[in-house]
Each structure stands twice: as structure tokens, then as C-alpha cells.
Image (cartoon, coloured by chain):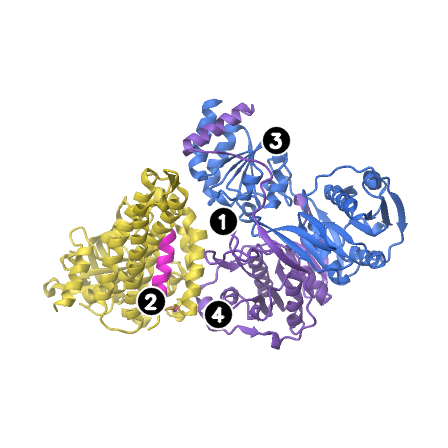
Amino acid sequence: MNFALSNDQKMLRDEVRKFAENELAPIAPEIDISGEFPKESIKKLAEMGLLGIVVPEKYGGSEFDFVSLAIAIEEISRACASTGVITAVNNSLTTYPILKFGNEEQKEKYLPDLCSGKKIGAIGITEPNAGSDVAAMETTAVLDEDHYILNGAKRFITNGTEAGIFVVFAYTNKELKHKGITAFIVERDTPGFSLGKHEDLMGIRATGNCELVFEDCKIPKENLLGELGQGFFICMNTLDVSRIDIGAQAVGISQAALDEAVKYSKERVTFGKPICKFGMIQNMLAEMATQIHAARMLVYYAAWCKDAGIKRFSKEAAMAKYYAANISVDVTRKAVQIFGGYGYTKDYPVERFYRDAKILELYEGTSEIQKLVIANELVR
Amino acid sequence: MTELFVLIEHRKGEIRDISFELLTCAKKIAEKENLNVTALLLGSKTDQIIDKIKNYAHKIYLFDDPVFENFNSEIYQKNLSDIIKKESPLLTLIGHTAFGMDLCPALATELNIPFSTDCLNLTFEDKKLKVTRQMFDGKLNTHEILRENPSYIITIRAGSFPAVEGNFNAEIVKLSPKETTEPEYRKFVEYIEAAIGDVDITKSDVVIGIGRGIREQENLEMIEELAASIGGVVGCSRPIVDADWLPKDRQVGSSGKIVKPKLYIAIGISGAFQHVMGMKNSDTIIAINKDPNAPIFNEADYGIVDDLMKVVPILKEKILEMK
Amino acid sequence: MDIIVCIKRVPQTAEAEVSIDSTGKSIQKDRLTFDMNESDTYALEEAVLLKEKFEGNITVLSLGYPDTDDTLRIALAKGADNAIRIKAENFENPDAFQTAQILKSVIKTINFDIILTGCIATDDAYSQIGVTLAELLEIPHAALVIKVDANEQRTHVHRELEEGLIEHLDIKLPALLTILTGINEPRYASLIAIRRAAKKEIQQLGKENIELEDLVINSVIEELYVPPVTKQVEILTGSPSETATKLAGIVKEKGLI
């Protein structure tokens, strides 16, 4: 057994941390207020090779493993949760399914642009009437000679306003239920594809979250990803991977909250001494640190499973995502509590962390769905 | 009598303040150790400089040649090593300046003389030279003992010995330089003056200096607003210029501008000595920094230990109210 | 153009609490982070820029303890070709002068056109190793360099003097330049470069591998201490609103508003 990071993982962590602290953290409060997508940051992420972390070098990626991907997402999220999820979506929800299920032409066509930041990636699963129940989706794709005609809408799409390449799921045969769902690669400028409502979110506010609308959207037949009817499988397989990164995002946000709380508790004096000397504060700090450590171990372990080639790690990924999201809300809440009234103001970043953390229990499968996945694996 | 050498620094025909400080330091040591203070002046058309320093030294060694008009460490080194070798002064003092930093280590190494740099003070204890220096971003001082030797070379930090005029009347001894040809491997080309910007921070009664602590460029706006409320201008420490957030002509410090406003407010500045050199003679100094151990508080008249993001906006409001 | 960059791994103390350890001669290091000395990162970047222009080889060199390998490896990822660690554990607390002598013994076995160093290490703040090293190697130097414009034989440099004045020099290569912060914009290492650098070997030189002359120590630290307070500051206390009000009052009292 070995818990030590390898040389390249350690270097990646240190360099990404430095990059995130210097380049991302300073603008995080500002883009949280404005909701403006951090385009300049994305350019810098691309230069460092952070947009295609697990993609092979021949497609323009950095060719690292999934533990490294998790570490990178953690460090980015520690500085800016919005940039963290933007990066996670580009990596594990767009480049990953194309890499894993795409054919050679698709990989060569789309991966280099996604890795270089020339085009940003997004994924369309959720719909106005289909969230946790993926199979309830209403979007359809009908073959018309050499095109599929897409109709429907996707909701809450991270990177939606900025993305150039979308992986979109639609029914090609409703009667086959989930086995009738197929995945497609949709380019932004496809006729019949438009953006709908831009969401004004509680947290992760700079993520270009919006609705996608398909009205007789004509997609070339060769943009079918994987096989006809393989969409649900692709979706679940992709979510197994991306949940690890949402867990990593949770660890990053939580760590940022703990760092701030420790610093503040040493500076803030009440009743004649720094509040870090008080048992009740220490109790919270100790709990937070332990929760974060446990979450990080779950995340790294799930990523390690993927790297080790273990076929079925849905349970481990769900546990990592469920637990890390859960403690992240708790840890950021405690951070606000330690800051007292100041924690509730925008003078300090902990209120932002608290808002950012809540989404973790909702997207890429709610906590309830994660528990369902875990339980199903237990009683299978 | 044993000699104490002081290297006179000048630029463009003007003597530099550090020279008087070195001579003041020299006098103090010379009295205690019974030494003879000799100013080493390598220059061209030096009458004015001689006039200014003759009360500060027992003797002036004058090397007069056009080649000494501009500083060139190589040619200075050749002539200085010659005279130091000949006379073996107990101590040679050089300024810890752009000039001294370029010269001292090479000179001392050539002569195999123990040396130290950027010293704030020095004393002889049992013939051993003990120097005071600063380390770790000015947060700690050290005492260091130099290897015992008949001769030492030290560079002194500017501002360590405020100049006090002496009552000597120096004997002027003209020496013929050993080397007066500028070496082909290091040639002086020109001085380039700093570009003149839209704001002259040396002319304002109020200067607000900002440093690393402001974290992000966007916070400049808040500082500009504070400056506007009080009728001042915004200056900064070196990291802000390195990051290109403000132009070079706003830099306060030894490599930037020296300011002496009625009020200097240092915001998010830790107080590295290079910065302090540029603002310590301000009438009133206020420091806002969240690190209570920041060296800037040693220079300030008033201090606030808190997050500048919280204090600055309120300060602006209060100033506008009181106006 | 072959370039040597001398770097140092130092504790990051600018914004950290610094306290003296039990020996009284050093600081407590366990809670500090360590990284490449700030001006050294600019020296390295300048070397990479020169290499991009002239091709050639960059060697990074550091006298340091085993954890210095991490710093050297990042230097490799940022564009250096070879890295050498001289084992500090083989030497007893070398001072700046001794460090320069050790570096010289190693450098004289390497081909180079330019040596770049940072202009100051933020820990001991001597600003002397670069210029000392140039003298030991008997090559020309320039300290506090803020611009480098080289050709194969010579380089024009700008030195930053006091009060914003620049001194423009023309120097023959091989030469040593000590580099100031702000001369360029140091890059981050890309992930691909990190992956490649992680596999590269860092040459380890022990005392037995170096042809050393008799080492001379110039100075020994006797003690570290907290600087005495020279000016009594009046710290204003209270909430931000209270302290800001007090401060505004003082500004008004002084007749500045």
C-alpha cells in the first residue's frame, strides 16, 4: 500500500496550486458577483494543459492519470469553485466520453480543440422534466437520410453559454426505454441549435449555466457518439468518472474554507484571546480537518480505482461524491460560523464558499441518487 | 595610524548621500578604534565633491581621470584593489547600493579579504568584526562574526547612519591611477532616465503606497477612490510594478522615487527596507497591514492591524464625511 | 548559447510568521513553505527566453538539501535541460562565500556562455554570490540586471540604479548577470513539461565528486533576534469602522483634509 503521490503528481499539485493562487483566486470574488465567464483564465488553463488532463498527447492532451485530474480539480476549486467546475466539465464530461467512446475521426476532430481551449466543452443530459430520472428525457433524434434531427431542450448546462462542443443525449427509440438513448456530438453553430435562459445561480455563478434549445437541429450522422442506443451506458460511465471530480471540487472548496477559518481564528480576539484557543472553535476546526481528509481519501481512492483499471467503481465514485459534497456543505457552514457575523458578509470569502458548496449535493446526481447507486451496488 | 577607507559614491558629477552616511559611520568607528578616516575619491572634475566631503575625513585619496566619470566596477576594482593592497586598511566601507553591490563582492574576493554586505551596524570585538544585518524579508536581525583578518570590506545599507558633518579638514593626496582604460569586456554605454509619467508622486502632500497585500489589480480602484477623497496620489512597492499594475514612476523606494509627503499611508506593504528608504522621511506615516509583525510598523506613527479590504472603504467614507 | 542558472530553495517568509528556533541561529522551518527564490525564477525565465532565441542548453545548479530536487525538477519543467544538486548535507553550514566557491568548482567543469543568478536571496539577503562567483571564475559581470539583449559574443544589459535610473552596459561573453525581479514574466510549467521533467534524473554531486580548493568561510551567524523597535507606533484598535474613524480623525487633526 502506498499513499505517497508520485513525482509528477506532486509537481502537478504544487504548480497548479501556485497557478490557482496567483491567477484564479484574485478574480474569484469578482466573477462570483458579476457572473462573468472567466475567459482569460480558460486561456491560461489551456496553456498549462489543464483542459485535457487525461487525454493522450497525440490529441493535444497532457496524458496524466485520473488521480492527477482529481488533484488538479481540487487545487483549482480551492481558488475558484466556478473555474473548478468549468475545468471538470471540459475534462471529465466532454473530453472523457469522446476519448472513451468516440471513433478515431471524432477524437482527431474534437479533442485537440477541447484541449487547447479553442473550443470549450459541455454536456447535455438534464432536461426541464428529467433530472435524476435520466430516462425521462424528452429530447429526440430522428434519422433523416444522412442527418439526425434533434428536438428538445436541456437545462442547467454548465459552460453552456461559452461551449463550442456539446455531448448531447437524446432518444433515438423511445420504446426501448433507456436502451433507446443515443449520444451525439453537437457543434455550437449547428442550424436549429440555440441557447435558452441563462441561469442566475446561488453559487458557482461564473459557469455560463444556461438552457440549450434544439429545434429541428440537423446533426451530421457521423456525429453519433459510440453506438446507437449506447447513450445511457455512456452517460452512466461518464458520470462515474465525473463524480470523482465533483468530489475533488468539494475537497478543494472545503480546504479553502478550512484555511480561511484557521487563519481567522488565530487573528480574531474575543474575551481577551484569539478564538482558536476556545474549545468550541477547536472542536469545529478538528471536525472540519478530519472530514476533509476523509473526503480526500475517498476521492483519491475512487480515482485510483479508475487508474488501476478496476472495471466497476460506480459505488466508490458515488461514495466519494456523496460524502465530499455532504461534508463540504457542513465544512463551509462551520467556516461561516467561526467567522460569526463577518462570515455572512462579502468582506470575507466564506459566504461564497458556503453558496458554492451547496451545488455539490445537487448536480451530477443529487446526494439521494448517489445513495441509490451505493445501495443498489450493495443489494445487487 | 591604521586606515579606514571610505569609497565615495557619485553619479553624473553629483556626490550621493550614501557617501556622507559612510563617512559618518567611519568617524564613529575611527574614534573608537583610533583609525584614520580616508575618503577614496575616483572621479573627474571633483572640486565640488572635495569641498563637500573635506570636513568628514582626515585624508582624501584622489584619483583624477576622465575614465572615473561614470561608474564601472571593473576599472574601480583594479584601482581599489591596488590601494587596498598597498595600505591594508583595517576596514573599507562601501555603500550597499547598485554601485556597491556590483563592486564589493568582486573586489573583496580578488583581495581574499573577508567581507559582508548590507550591514546596518558594525563593531570590533577582540579584533573581530561583528556586523548587524537583516534576514528573512527584514523580519529578523542577525549578528555575524567575520573571519579574523587584518583588513575587511563591508557594504552599509543606506539610511543606517544619518549624516553628521565632521570637523576634519582633509588633506588631499593625489594618486596616479593604476588603470585608466575602460576594459573592452565591460563598456559603459549610457544612462537612461526613467520615463516621465502623468503623475509626479514626489510633488504630492499625500501619498498612498500599496503593496502585495492588495492582492488583486481590481482593488486599485478602491485605493484610487481613497486617494481622491483625501487629495493624494497612489504610489506602490516594487511587486506592484513587477506585476505591471502601476507604471515604474509610481514606485516608492531605493530603486524608485524618494517621497517626503506630509502624509504617507502604507496599505498592504510589509516594509522591505528598499521601500522604506523611499518614504521614511514623510512627516506622518500610517500603516494598514494584517500582519502585526510586518516591519512597516517599525516606521509608522499610526498603525491598523486589520484586513485592508475592510478598513479602506470605511476610511474613505469617514474622510469624505469629515471634509 | 549554453546557460547556467544558479538557484536556491528558500523559505517563503514575505507573508508568513517567522520565529527563531532553539539554536537561536536559524528559524523554525516546519510551518513554512519552500520554493525557488523569487529573483531566481526570473533568472530561469530569462535563460529560457535566451534559449528560445539562440538554442543551446540550460543547466540549473543548486547547493541544497535533498528536498531541493523538487525545486530543480520544476526548473526542468520550466525549460532547463539539466539539473545538478550539490549535496548541502556534505558541507557544514556554508556561508555565501563558501557557497560561491563550491559553485565555482562545479561550474568550471561545464561549458557556458552566460551564468544567470537571482540578484538576492530572500532568506539571507546578501546579494553577493553572483558577483563573487564571477570574480572566482574570472569573467565579467553585471549586477541588478533588468534587461538583457544578447548576441553570440556580447550582451547589452540594463542595470537598475537608484531612483529609476538605468545604466546601459555592453559586456563580453562569457559573463555572469544577476537578475532583478520584473525583467520578464516567469511562466508556469505545463503539465506535459512536468510529466517529462518528473522522469529526468537530477545529477547529485557529493563532496567526493567535486574538485574543491580549500574552502574559506567569511562569516558565521552568532545569533538571530527580533529587530528592536526604533519608532513607537500607535496601533489603533477596534472594529474596522472604529479604527477607520480614528484614523480619519488623525488625518483631519493634521490638517490634511
Region rendered in magenta: A63-79
Mark 2: which secondary structure? helix
Q: Which residue is mark 1?
A: C15
Relative placement, left or right, of A192 versus B308 is left
Mark 4: which secondary structure? helix
Q: Residue at x 55, y 70 (%)?
A: C81
| Horizontal and vertical percent position of residue A370 | 19, 59
Colour chain B appears in: blue
* Co-location on one chain, circles 4 and 3: no
Q: CA distance from mark 1 to mark 4?
A: 30 Å
| Residue farthest to the bottom, as pictured | C208
From the rendered image, report the letter of the chain displayed in yellow: A
* Co-location on one chain, circles 1 and 4: yes
User: Which one is closest to the eye, mark 2 or mark 3?
Assistant: 3
- Magenta segment, principal secondary structure? helix
Q: Which residue is mark 4?
A: C197
Q: Earlier in the sequence, mark 1 or mark 4?
A: 1
Identify the subunit bearing mark 4.
C
| Horizontal and vertical percent position of residue A238 | 25, 64
Colour chain C appears in: purple
Identify the subunit bearing mark 2.
A
User: Which one is closest to the eye, mark 4 or mark 3?
Assistant: 3
Q: Is residue A315 above or below residue B139?
A: below
| Numbered tag placed on residue A66 in the rendering | 2
Mark 1: which secondary structure? loop
Q: Is residue C50 above or below residue B221?
A: below
| Residue farthest to the front, as pictured | B126
User: Which one is closest to the eye, mark 1 or mark 4?
Assistant: 1
